[in-house]
Image: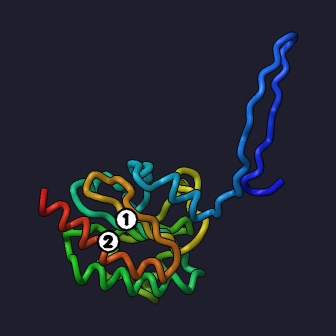
């Protein structure tokens, strides 16, 4: 069978037969699945530790919010850190930036000492919600939320994160025009 083929399925139940015709489609890639799952929806809940204190995204409600899912072993994540530093310099307190890892606090803190994340709240996703509810399986993944914490954009890898500041400007303009 190939993409676009039609398949007829028969359902038999005692003396009744029902038929349904399905059109087969190729399985979407992981990035498409994550985008379909998140964009246009309220951000899934996530608790994380920042400096030993438990926080959640709802503390940022009312601000444009960037959520960066990263790992210490991920070289492209360092480039994303440079982009997020520029984002912080450009927008300051108008935008909340959270950089979340599922690694141990000890490992993350050692990394942050070596490579500081200026203007970014670094948190530990200790419940691994990023994978279970957000369906994050690739790093870096950066998600942009509007002031109501609705997902407006999902960016994978360094090249897509280059679009981040333009997308934030658009959200801030929309907010100003309302």
Spot occupied by residue 84 in the image (x, y as percentages of width and height): 36, 80
Residue 51 in view of the camera: no
Q: Which mark is residue 144?
A: 1
Per the image, label 1 sits on a secondary structure element best described as strand
Per the image, label 2 sits on a secondary structure element best described as helix
Residue at 13% x, 56% y is 178
Mark closer to the observer (2, 1):
2
Spot occupied by residue 80 in the image (x, y as percentages of width and height): 44, 82
- Farthest residue in the left direction? 177
Residue at 44% x, 49% y is 44
- 67 versus 6 height, above or below: below
Quadrant of residue 63 in the image?
A: bottom left
Q: Of residues 172 and 50, which is closer to you in this image?
A: 172
* 148 horizontally vs 123: left or right: left
Residue at 73% x, 49% y is 24
* 5 horizontally vs 95: left or right: right
Determine whether label 2 and label 1 are within 8 Å by CB.
Answer: yes
Q: Of residues 143 and 27, which is closer to you in this image?
A: 27
- 84 versus 152 height, above or below: below
Quadrant of residue 72 in the image?
A: bottom right
Residue 90 in view of the camera: yes
Coloring applied to the structure: rainbow
């Amino acid at each position: 069978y190939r993409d676009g083929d039609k398949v007829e399925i028969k359902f038999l139940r005692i003396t009744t037969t029902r038929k349904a015709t399905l059109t087969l489609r190729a399985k979407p890639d992981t990035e498409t699945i994550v985008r379909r799952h998140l964009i246009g929806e309220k951000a899934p809940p996530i608790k994380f530790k920042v400096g030993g204190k438990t926080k959640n995204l709802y503390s940022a409600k009312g601000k444009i919010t960037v959520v960066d899912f990263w790992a210490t072993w991920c070289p492209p994540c360092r480039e994303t850190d440079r982009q997020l530093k520029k984002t912080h310099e450009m927008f300051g307190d108008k935008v909340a930036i959270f950089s979340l890892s599922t690694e141990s606090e000890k490992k993350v803190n050692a990394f942050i000492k070596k490579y500081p994340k200026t203007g970014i709240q670094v948190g530990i996703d200790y419940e691994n919600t990023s994978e279970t509810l957000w369906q994050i399986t690739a790093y870096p993944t950066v998600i942009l939320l509007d002031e109501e914490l609705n997902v407006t954009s999902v960016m994978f890898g360094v090249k897509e994160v280059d679009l981040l500041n333009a997308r934030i400007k658009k959200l801030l303009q929309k907010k100003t025009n309302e």
